[in-house]
Image (cartoon, rainbow, N blue to C red):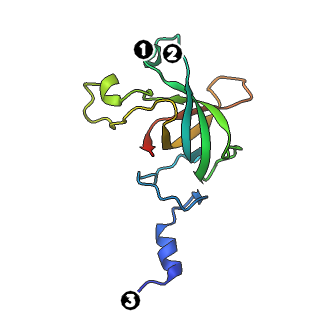
């Protein structure tokens, strides 16, 4: 029995995720954070290293990023992120190649690193810092896929 077009579409649709573009994701984003957005972005500027006790004091972690397109939004997403926005984003595994930063972590995702003008597909999670009375959200990216 051949599935109908409606059945084909429903089998690939993921609950809780609104698909905003027909750009196929090559990375498995089935666990999209409810507060997250799957985006196509590019690095505009790499910002200074942080002055703290984290890995980001030794490696570049923060960048100004242009959101080129929002592909999906998590089911609880309540933000206003849209294509054309520029965000300050923290890359939790740094902007450098992960095997360079974490050479002993062979089980870690092998991210290639990002430089200015590099394009990527990633999930941006926006959240208010814990214990903060800030009115704006911080944006972070853990995993990304470099694209051309």
**Residues at circles 3 and 1 in contact by the CB criterion of under 8 Å:** no
For the residues labelled 3 and 1, the Cα–Cα distance comes to 58 Å
* Residue 64 found in image quarter: top right
Tell me the mark number nearer the camera, choosing from 2 and 3. 2
Visible residue check, residue 38: yes
Above or below, 55 against 66 in this view is above
Q: Quadrant of the N terminus?
A: bottom left
Depth check, front residue: 148 or 32: 148
**Residues at circles 1 and 2 in contact by the CB criterion of under 8 Å:** yes
For the residues labelled 1 and 2, the Cα–Cα distance comes to 7 Å
Visible residue check, residue 73: no
Q: Which mark is residue 58?
A: 1
Residue found 55% across the figure and 41% down from its top: 41
Residue found 64% across the figure and 23% down from its top: 131
Q: Residue furthest bottom?
A: 1
**What residue sits right under mark 2 in the picture?**
49
Q: Secondary structure at mark 2?
A: loop
Depth check, front residue: 82 or 130: 82
């Amino acid at each position: 029995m051949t599935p109908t077009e409606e059945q084909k579409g429903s089998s690939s649709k993921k609950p809780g995720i609104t698909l905003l573009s027909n750009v196929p994701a090559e990375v498995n984003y089935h666990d999209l954070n409810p507060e997250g957005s799957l985006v196509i972005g590019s690095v505009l500027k790499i910002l200074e290293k942080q002055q703290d006790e984290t890995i980001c004091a030794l490696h570049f972690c923060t960048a100004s990023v242009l959101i080129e397109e929002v592909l999906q939004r998590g089911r609880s997403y309540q933000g206003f992120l849209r294509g054309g926005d520029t965000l300050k984003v923290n890359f939790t595994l740094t902007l450098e190649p992960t095997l360079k930063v974490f050479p002993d972590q062979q089980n870690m995702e092998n991210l290639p690193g990002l430089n200015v003008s590099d394009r990527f597909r990633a999930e941006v999670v926006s959240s208010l810092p814990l214990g903060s009375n800030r009115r704006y959200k911080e944006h972070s990216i853990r995993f990304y896929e470099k694209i051309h």
